C-alpha cells in the first residue's frame, strides 16, 4: 500500500524521523524540507536532499555553502509537480564532521532560505 503524506504536521514528523535516521548513521539517503533557519544532523559520508517549494514565479538558484563539511552535488525538479510553483530537490554529500550554513537565494524575489547542516 502506497501512503501519501499531504498534511504539514505529518510531513514535519516524517522529516524528524528522517533526521533521526541520519543521526543514527543510516546508509539510506535522507531528505529534509528546507525552511528558513532549520538545522539538520547528518552522518559523515551520507548523501542527503533538501527540498524547497516555490510559490509563484522564480526558483531557487544553486546554494552557497559556508564550509567544506558538505558538498553540493546537483539540483533537480521534484518528480511530483504542484500547481503553486516548482519543487526543487538539492542533493548534497556530507564530506567531514563540522557545520555548514547553506543559503538558497530565490531568483524571483529577495527571499532566501538559510539552513544549518551539522555533520557528525
Image (cartoon, helix red, strand yellow):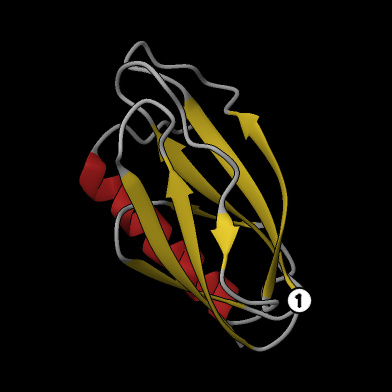
Q: Nearer the viewer, residue 119 or 58?
A: 58
Could you tell me which residue is drawn at 24 percent across and 37 percent down? Answer: 7
Q: Nearer the viewer, residue 82 or 4?
A: 82
Q: Where 37 sits versus 9, above or below?
A: below
Q: Which residue is disc 1 drawn over?
A: 95
Which residue is drawn at the image coordinates 46% and 22% (left, top)?
A: 86
Q: Where is residue 91 in the image (x, y as percent from the top left)?
A: 67, 50
Q: Which residue lies furthest to the front in this view?
A: 110
Residue 79, quarter of the rendered image: top right
Question: Which SS class for mark 1?
Answer: loop
Q: Where is residue 67 in the image (x, y as percent from the top left)?
A: 63, 77
Closer to the camera, 67 or 120? 67
Side of 13 where 86 appears, left or right: right
- Residue at point 77% right, 75% down? 45
State the count of labels: 1
Q: Is residue 103 above or below residue 16?
A: above
Outermost residue, top side:
83
Crowding at dot 1, Cα within 10 Å, few <14 / some 14-19 / many 20+, comes out as some
Q: Name the foreground residue: 33 vs 60.
A: 60
Find residue 35 and report its horizontal and vertical position in percent: 32, 52
Q: Quadrant of the C terminus?
A: bottom right
Is 26 on the left or on the right of 22, as rendered?
A: right
Residue drawn at (30%, 23%) of the image? 55
Q: Position of residue 77 (x, y in %)?
A: 60, 26
Amino acid at each position: 500500500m502506497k501512503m501519501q503524506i499531504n498534511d504539514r504536521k505529518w510531513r514535519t514528523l516524517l522529516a524528524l524521523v528522517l533526521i533521526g535516521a541520519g543521526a543514527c548513521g543510516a546508509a539510506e539517503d535522507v531528505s529534509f524540507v528546507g525552511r528558513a533557519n532549520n538545522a539538520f544532523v547528518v552522518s559523515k559520508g551520507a548523501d542527503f536532499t533538501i527540498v524547497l517549494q516555490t510559490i509563484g514565479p522564480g526558483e531557487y538558484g544553486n546554494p552557497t555553502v559556508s564550509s567544506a563539511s558538505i558538498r553540493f552535488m546537483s539540483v533537480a525538479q521534484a518528480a511530483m509537480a504542484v500547481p503553486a510553483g516548482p519543487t526543487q530537490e538539492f542533493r548534497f554529500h556530507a564530506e567531514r564532521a563540522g557545520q555548514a550554513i547553506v543559503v538558497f537565494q530565490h531568483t524571483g524575489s529577495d527571499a532566501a532560505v538559510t539552513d544549518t547542516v551539522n555533520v557528525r
